[in-house]
Image (spheres, rainbow, N blue to C red):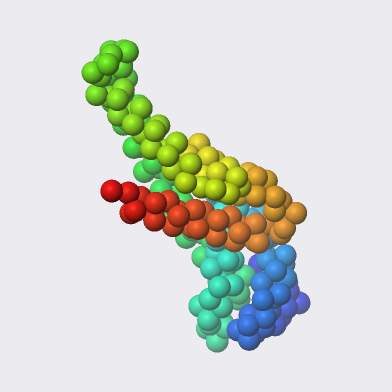
Amino acid sequence: MAETGDAQQLLVLHKRLLEGDRVASEELAGLVLERLVSDLGRKFPHTDSHVICDGVTDAVLDYCARPVSFDSSRGVPLDRFLAKAAWRNIANLLRSERRRKAREDKSVEYFEQKVVELQPSAGNPLQNEALAQQDQVAELMQTLENPVDKKVFELRMLGERRTEEFARVMGISHLPLVEQRSEVKRAKDRIEKLLKRHKASRP
């Protein structure tokens, strides 16, 4: 995949990453991200471009976090190593998406069968459950003091997955994609921990 010059440059960047050079990760991302997204897009021609981008970005981020995972002595070029990791990520994302879609289809079918039961009624169990879920989400929203965290949480509740949408509300759209992805993941993890602590503290 990579030209000889690029392959040598990747090895130099790999060495810098092993030595703890944080700047090297941004340089490496700039060198391989666009090419990997293009290559994997051809291997998954009918897949949403956001899924391709997520799989590739995760592969690069994971490698940059643990550069020791790549063994240059095995004779496999770094870009091929990253392409294989990205391929696995995309395949896993597609499997997860299929399972999620199957669950959603079952839920839709179930609620269509129960549509009569959803008519307004003070004692309606399904309606009461939906209202309780709405109240729970509203309560969780109130525990987040940071307005940006509220927007991130709201996007997640709406089912948003695109990194650029989270980056937009976080005000980090100007950062390189690999950094956006890292910051968005950090924000999601932090919010999730805050909400878990809130739930644990409830009587």
Residue 113 placement: quadrant: top left
Up/down of 186 relative to 48, above or below: below
- Work out whether residue 46 or residue 28 is closer to the camera in this orientation and state it: 28
Locate the N terminus by quadrant. bottom right
Q: Residue at x 70, y 69 (%)?
A: 26
Residue 200 placement: quadrant: bottom left
Residue 21 in view in this figure: yes
- Work out whether residue 111 or residue 9 is closer to the camera in this orientation and state it: 111
The picture places residue 123, in percent across and down from the top left corner, at 23, 18
Q: Residue at x 72, y 58 (%)?
A: 175
- Work out whether residue 57 or residue 20 is closer to the camera in this orientation and state it: 20
Residue 54 placement: quadrant: bottom right
The picture places residue 118, in percent across and down from the top left corner, at 31, 17
Q: Residue at x 51, y 65 (%)?
A: 85
**Residue projecting furthest to the front:** 203
Q: Residue at x 50, y 36 (%)?
A: 158
Up/down of 198 relative to 139, above or below: below
The picture places residue 4, in percent across and down from the top left corner, at 73, 77
Up/down of 23 relative to 193, above or below: below
Up/down of 63 relative to 202, above or below: below
Number of disc labels: 0
Residue 52 in view in this figure: no
| Relative to 44, 30 lies left or right | right
The picture places residue 170, in percent across and down from the top left corner, at 65, 49
